Image: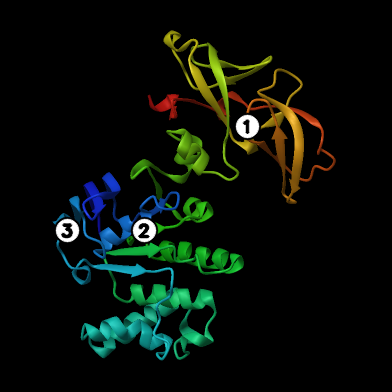
Amino acid sequence: MANLKLVDVEKTYGGTVNVLNNVNLDIEQGELIVFVGPSGCGKSTLLRMIAGLESITSGTLDIDGQRMNQVPPSQRGIAMVFQSYALYPHMTVRENMAFALKLAKKPKEEIDAAIDRAAKVLQLDQYLDRLPKALSGGQRQRVAIGRSIVRDPKVYLFDEPLSNLDAALRVATRIEIAKLKEAMPQSTMIYVTHDQVEAMTLATRIVVLANKGVAQVGTPLELYETPNSEFVAQFIGSPAMNLVPGEVIETGAQTVVDLGDGRQVTSAVPTTEADKGLKVNVGMRPEDLTATDGTAAITGSVNYTEELGEVTLLYIDSPQSDEALLAKLPGIHKGLRGSTVALTAVPEKVHLFANGTSLLYR
């Protein structure tokens, strides 16, 4: 099992098309690191650079202190699980899992023992003699994961492994991957996904990629509760955080922001006297908004509702935003469409951003 260190890693295609810039990461043994970001941000490219399937234009990649830039993929001690299962259709589950070990000329007893261990962890014991066509999508993905486990690599790389599964299978297989990690606490895993739920539930830490680099690194709750920028604040969390413009009118341990037309909000983000008059964007998550009879932070008319059973989403037309603002209320709320609402949030749940950056990270 391994530690990884990336220092000033860059990727450029053809000398002109820059994809990644100045990526610096320290990944500790036993972590499950998840790369997330918008399409085209370079998360799969970064994963492939770690695997050796893409060259590193500049910068360094070390695994356990050994420089890997020029080391072939087969010698990096890495196993990769792709979106497509890439199973050999004419081979049984056992044969698929044994294939790489046979190529490495491992003894039969060692191969059988490794397959039995992996099959037990992944609950594939009863499927070892079946062909891939006789398996469900989730079972095939488990076989692909098992093929990696038997190699006992230093690092496991997962490139959107659940994207080809339907919703129910994604949930079931995500839980299986979480249990797999628990059963292998010393294993280092790096996982690419576009699914926030996968990232929030699986990750030890999340790496948010944007603008050709790393936007923020932290635990799921750190990114959710203290995003360092408007981008991270709106990318992490679903529905996205509401942002409304305002002006700081009172500073100190708590900050009061004027939101116009009699609307105000208090934030627990501290400011100094020099911040008085500062133009900010105030961030409030939909689930943190509650109705108020006092001074409101958000007012408007409910133009649409989504009753999801456990929660009700309100889409609010407000002069404070060109886009609908969202409130997420627990339980079922009927008859709110067309009504006028006044909402606020407790100071600890109110974020402040200036020029796109959280005031907590100035």
Indicate which disc, 2 or 3, sits on the residue closer to the N terminus: 2
Q: Which residue is under mark 1?
A: 322
Q: Which of these two is toward me, 48 or 291? A: 48
Q: Which residue is under mark 2?
A: 44
The image shows residue 6 at horizontal and vertical percentages of 23, 49
Indicate which disc, 1 or 2, sits on the residue closer to the N terminus: 2
Q: Secondary structure at mark 2?
A: helix
Q: Residue furthest right?
A: 335
* Residue visible at 60% across and 65% down in the picture: 167
Q: Are marks 2 and 3 in contact (CB under 8 Å)?
A: no
Q: Residue furthest top?
A: 273
**Numbered tag placed on residue 268 in the rendering:** none
Q: Which of these two is toward me, 268 or 162? A: 162
Q: Is residue 37 above or below residue 104?
A: above
Callout in the foreground (1, 2) = 1
Q: Are marks 1 and 2 in contact (CB under 8 Å)?
A: no
* Residue visible at 21% across and 72% down in the picture: 74
Q: Secondary structure at mark 3?
A: loop
Mark 2 nearby-residue class (10 Å; few <14, some 14–19, many ≥20): some
In the rendered image, the quadrant that contains the N terminus is bottom left
Q: Which residue is under mark 3?
A: 69
The image shows residue 306 at horizontal and vertical percentages of 74, 47
The image shows residue 205 at horizontal and vertical percentages of 40, 48
Three-letter amino acid code of the residue under disc 2 = Ser
In the rendered image, the quadrant that contains the C terminus is top left
